[in-house]
Amino acid sequence: MSTLTTETIVILQENLDKQVRDRSWRKILHLLAVTGIANNQQLIQASGLNRDKLRRTLDKMTAAAAGFPPLFSIYNRKLRRASERGAAPRVYRIEESGAALCKADGLANAHPCKLEEQRSVLHAQGMLDVHLAAQAAGLEVRTDQNLDYNEDAFIRPDNLVRLPNGRLAIFESEQDARSDYLNRMLRSLAHKAAFFDSQASEACSSSVRMLIDLPRGKLWQRTLTTWQHAVAINREARSSALPFRLLAMPLGDFLPRPDWSDEPETGRWVDLTEAQTTLALPPAPSQQTQASLPFTNLERRMILAALLQELRANGPAARQPLPDAEFLYLMRLIYIASHDPFAPALQRSGTPYESLYLLSQYLQMNPNLRQLIEQTTQKDARRIHWNQSTALHRMQVVVDAFLEYHGWQSDGALIVYTYTPDYQAHGPRRLSVMVEIADPEILMSGESALVPGKQEITILEKSLGWVLTALFALTHHLGLKKPPFW
């Protein structure tokens, strides 16, 4: 709740009008209020100011608000959109005084921005791009607002635009989509299907436009494939086709020449509701062995340097599996199946059958991994006197083997270790596996320069920790032999 009174808001307005005589401060704050976020280029577009004039205006606004809660703040984390080239523009967030002034101007939805996660900030910028494009075309647009269709039922389109012919159209802003985002994507599709099944959708175009903030390339294709899987799953669950079309286009292709037609332009959009998808498993990793001859230390060093150069020149195909961020997101997909924070609490309290099913299927897809786990767990079991120390050591050996199979180690930027919870800990006191992502840069994919935020890192750590612990604690669900020390 704002701490500003009506009197202080009036004083603040007067201060701003004195400092910024063209009153462009209102355009700036009103734009920030749309999604809570705007970057430098978006503020220039909305205010009509050039870069230097905008900078001076923002400085004057800060001076005028001295002694009051801030009007806006600068998002200080490094942030680059996948479609951007060159230096990333500065990003601003609306704060308490700015939101209060916007409310006083009749913008009821204005509120201080609480966005911290980079992905959320990028999404807000994508929504605002479409909002500005619609305004530039003279079209009515509602951004990030509820659209009611039944009693206590609504959807929340990123942008709802009234097209030139008077019909409404839903424009969604998206980024790259991994398979572990599937639950969120399925919910989004299910909610839209419920809306288009209702009479309230008669005034709305049945083509839902999805603008993806990615350039065309491998990541773009992978994102489309993930959405196609979501559509196929939803279609199978309904036993019928979706009551709407889901169309996709890169945001960078749309903005220079927006398509506001009721029937989207042929050839520019990809129809994801008609595309078919296939799944393919990656090929088995190749192996390479090298032998060293008994030369002098200098000769050995020169030979090894040459071998290293050859190894790097041959590329990944000639080496063992390389660590891949997709492995961690795969573990998250398995974990989140039964630990979805959006699922009812009672459902999350039950035996995690869905996660166990996916983990079991994953082991069946990788018979060599399954055999490796069992052999490493059971090796010399009858000859060892098992106690807590030997059990923890054996668990660590199995964990290391599991990670090495996927190209990872347990003591690098990804730290994985076995432990016994403290007896004062609130939770099960069983032997467990702890995961820490020491360097979040390992989560950056090749075409996306975005480092996930703390919340996403935490769930990835929990996911891998749960999977590795399940290999010992839940073997009866996975078809594995029970560890001799369990």
Image (cartoon, rainbow, N blue to C red):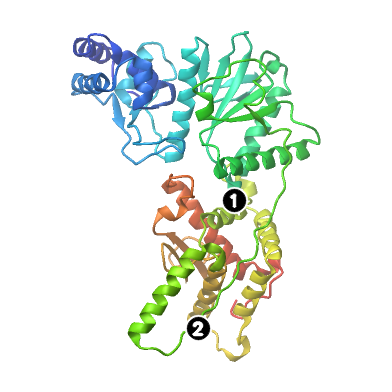
Query: In the image, what residue occupies the spot 55% across and 43% down?
Result: 219
- Picture quarter containing residue 351? bottom right
**Do the CB atoms of the residues marked 2 and 1 lie less than 8 Å apart?**
no
Inter-mark Cα distance, 2 to 1: 45 Å
Front-most of 436 and 371? 371
261 shown above or below 296 = above
Circle 1 packing at 10 Å, graded few (<14), some (14-19), many (20+), is many
Q: Residue 32 at what x, y percent from top left?
A: 38, 22
- Tell me the kind of residue under disc 1: Ile
Q: Residue 372 at what x, y percent from top left?
A: 63, 75
**In the rendered structure, which disc, 2 or 1, sits on the residue that comes first in sequence?**
2
Circle 2 packing at 10 Å, graded few (<14), some (14-19), many (20+), is few
Residue 343 is at least partly visible in this image: no
* Numbered circle sitting on residue 336: 1
Query: In the image, what residue occupies the spot 62% across and 43% down?
Result: 182
- Location of the N terminus by quadrant is top left
- Answer left or right for 399 relative to 92: right
User: In this rendering, which labeled residue sits more in front, label 2 or label 1?
Assistant: 2
Query: In the image, what residue occupies the spot 60% across and 39% down?
Result: 184
From the image, tell me which residue sits under label 2.
291
Front-most of 53 and 459? 53
- Which structural element holds mark 2? loop
- Which structural element holds mark 1? helix
- Tell me the kind of residue under disc 2: Ala
366 shown above or below 52 = below
Q: Residue 111 at what x, y percent from top left?
A: 39, 24
- Answer left or right for 6 relative to 367: left
474 shown above or below 254 = below
